[in-house]
Image (spheres, rainbow, N blue to C red):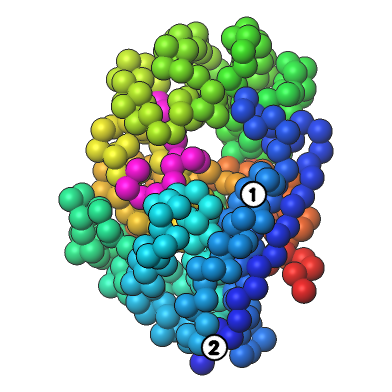
Amino acid sequence: MTTIRAIRTVDRIYSLAPGEGADAIHTNPQYAYAICLLETDTPLRGVGFAFTLGGGNALVCAAIEALATTLVGRDIEELMASYGTMYTSIANHHQYRWLGPHKGVVHLALAAITNACFDLWAKHRRIPLWQLLLDLSPSALVATLDFSSLENILTPAQATTILSNAHASRSARMAVLRDGYPGYDTSVGWFHYDEFQVRENAKRARAAGFGAVKLKVGARDPNYDLRRAAAVRAELGADATLMLDANQQWSLPQALTMCEAFREINPFWIEEPLHPDDIVGHQTLAGQIAPLHIAAGEHLPNAVVFKNYLQLQALHFVQADCVRVGGVSEFLTISLMARQFGLPVAPHVGDMGQVHQHLVLFNHIGMGHDRLFLEYIPHLRQHFVHPAIVQDGVYLTPYEPGSSSDVFDLD
């Protein structure tokens, strides 16, 4: 047995080099983790985090401490056998739910708690998270999920069927463990990088083996965006994969204008073109800019909002983030919904890919999602005990027990 004996939090904020992490709205970010630590009666410790840009990180830590007390005294195997029930209980706390529901500080806290539980579970079994998820039967995995308000498009029975059907064809997808999971480079195009720098960064990314890169757009001067995008496209060539990310900066009329202007550089997707709550706006935009595609999810807070996007055909690439939604559990629920709708999952990676490298492996092998690519942002890798390893543009499979979330100096 491995019993949770105490909950502890760590508020960790990291400064970035000039220009790193900046986009059209978040112009001077810090990268920060609100870390949940599950201390046990063994040497094992569960580590899970939510991601912020610095301000408010302490609030998330306080919410973790308030919400996680119900885990104390629980054996990890017994807890995770029905974690979906615990998840629902925490998410619907009779007082703290008022602060959401299922969004903001309290939901970020639930993400950190949930991620710590899955990390501890994998460590207890002495296997990496991706292996833990693959080892679970469909019914055991479904028992870790919360289907509240989703039953009109995804029931537990339907989720079990998706997983069972994918199990029969797993052998055809196991090669990803040997070959690795492709990455794409976001650090090419942070918002403050000028034309010369984005072009040099694109050259560096291509030399490092990346077949896809992303550029931040959304400037007040449209020509700034157009010049930088043209510079990257010229450097990479017509056949390279280039994504554009507006970080919610545009209104619908602006987005329509800019998407038309970007057509000639043939972006693979337009990411976060509008305010994330403007679901009908995304639906309208998707219909009018076709065949250009929309990616969204970085700021979609929960599975219900993702459900609405899917129902209205308001996005084409699902960018769920397990340190933004309610952790591994809700990420998997969203991935199952995406599978139900036949859409690919390409996670937003606020956590430098540490946890998501496990989840995309499971999505591909265990659900049958395409082996697309995973965002790569290396700015904090030196702080991790087991950082994600990317070689020739590919994430190598991690084999250390847990979810690769341990950072240095937690004691």
* Front-lying residue, 152 or 245: 152
Query: Residue shown at 61%/51% (left/top)?
Result: 51
Name the amino acid, label 2.
Answer: Thr
Find residue 211 and report its image quarter.
top right
Q: In this view, does 98 lie above or below 312?
A: below
Q: In this view, does 169 lie to the left or right of 67?
A: left
Name the amino acid, label 1.
Answer: Gly
Which residue position is annotated with label 1? 56
Query: Residue shown at 57%/46% (left/top)?
Result: 349
The stretch in magenta equals 293-305
Query: Residue shown at 30%/44% (left/top)?
Result: 307
Q: Which residue lies furthest to the right in this view?
A: 17
Give yes or no for residue 129 being in the magenta stretch: no
Number of marks in picture? 2
* Front-lying residue, 38 or 385: 38
Q: Where is residue 318 in the image (x, y as percent from the top left)?
A: 41, 41
Of the two numbered discs 1 and 2 in the rendering, the one whose residue sits closer to the viewer? 1
Which residue position is annotated with label 2? 2
Q: Can residue 34 be seen in this view?
A: yes
Query: Residue shown at 28%/60% (left/top)?
Result: 147
Find residue 308 and report its image quarter.
top left
Q: Is mark 1 on a helix, strand or loop?
A: loop
